[in-house]
Amino acid sequence: MSTLEPFGARLRRAMDERGPLCVGIDPHASLLTEWGLNDDVAGLERFSRRVVEATADRVAVLKPQIAFFERFGSRGLAVLEKSVEEARAAGALVVMDAKRGDIGSTMAAYAEAFLDPGAPLFSDALTVSPYLGYGSLKPAVELARSSGAGLFVLALTSNPEGGEVQHAVRSDGRTVGATVLAHLAEENAGQAPLGSFGAVVGATLGDLSTYDLEMNGPLLAPGIGAQGATPADLPRVFGAAVRNVVPNVSRGVLRHGPDVVALRDAAERFAQEVRAAVAGG
């Protein structure tokens, strides 16, 4: 298997050079309509291609949400394959937002679909769910490590329902979310300049000082823009770990389409605001 430079190293460089911003590719039916597109494969293709054209040569990360492509079946996945290929060719790192989680050979198959460099949907990193037990992610961890890819593990998510699981306290007194972060710190131990195993931590969660977010890995932070958080909130929420935060913006950028220049300008504004907030933090 051909091996890339570790994802953490590639991400650190992209964040330093392009600014720490992730733009989501989320072709909601409502957004297609706002863009004057039909809610069909042709509309999906035009939407995705326009976002990639506008942003892939200037933002650090693009994050397609696979569900919005899967709803069109094999033709939608073909659009996704092309979008991933074009985004990576333009220099963006691609995080596939698929939130996969299972056990054994099934988890291994999910990993092969997104983390094997020979796979049609190979991405630089994959979002995964640890809620069948962190150990269930072992096949994805091993393949990511061997191929130079990365993972973003759901830890402290921005949806309000997440707290009933993630803030639950184990018998050892540690919360489930803190346990996930501790596992990731172990995966990233000794890695420089940044580990390849990140956590998903919502930017809308407020004070997280009771959690140890300094686990030498990236923190993918949804919630900027339409969900209510702003770049200026990042130092308060993430504290000393703010330098490793990759804030995700979707609708805040995408609503400016279909005009390429407007999309590009919106992404650059967010990138500048995030860079300023992180530098100030």
Image (tube, grey):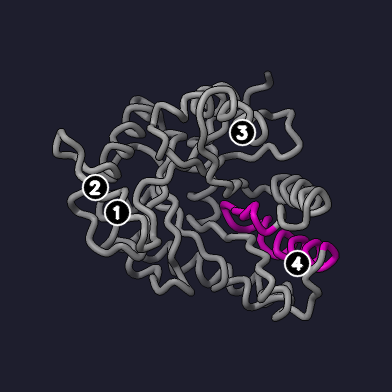
Q: Please tell me the numbered disc located at residue 164.
A: 1
Mark in the foreground, 3 or 4 = 3
Q: CA distance from mark 4 to mark 1?
A: 36 Å
The kind of residue on which mark 1 rests is: Glu
The x, y position of residue 276, in whole percent, is 39, 65
| Labels 1 and 2 touching (C-beta < 8 A) | yes
Residue occupying the point 50% across, 41% down: 128
Mark 4 = which residue?
47
Residue 160 found in image quarter = bottom left
Q: Across the whole image, how many numbered discs are drawn on residues?
A: 4
Mark in the foreground, 4 or 1 = 1
| Labels 3 and 4 touching (C-beta < 8 A) | no
Q: Please tell me the numbered disc located at residue 168.
A: 2
Q: Is residue 114 above or below residue 53?
A: above
| Labels 2 and 4 touching (C-beta < 8 A) | no
| Mark 2 secondary-structure assignment | loop
| Labels 4 and 1 touching (C-beta < 8 A) | no
Residue occupying the point 77% across, 61% down: 49
Mark in the foreground, 1 or 3 = 1
Q: CA distance from mark 1 to mark 2?
A: 6 Å
The residue range painted magenta reads: 41-68
Q: Does 253 lie within the magenta span?
A: no
Mark 2 or mark 4, earlier in chain = 4
Left or right of 189, for residue 257: right
Residue occupying the point 68% across, 37% down: 122
| Mark 1 secondary-structure assignment | helix
Magenta portion: prevailing SS class:
helix
| Mark 4 secondary-structure assignment | helix
Q: Please tell me the numbered disc located at residue 110.
A: 3
The kind of residue on which mark 4 rests is: Phe
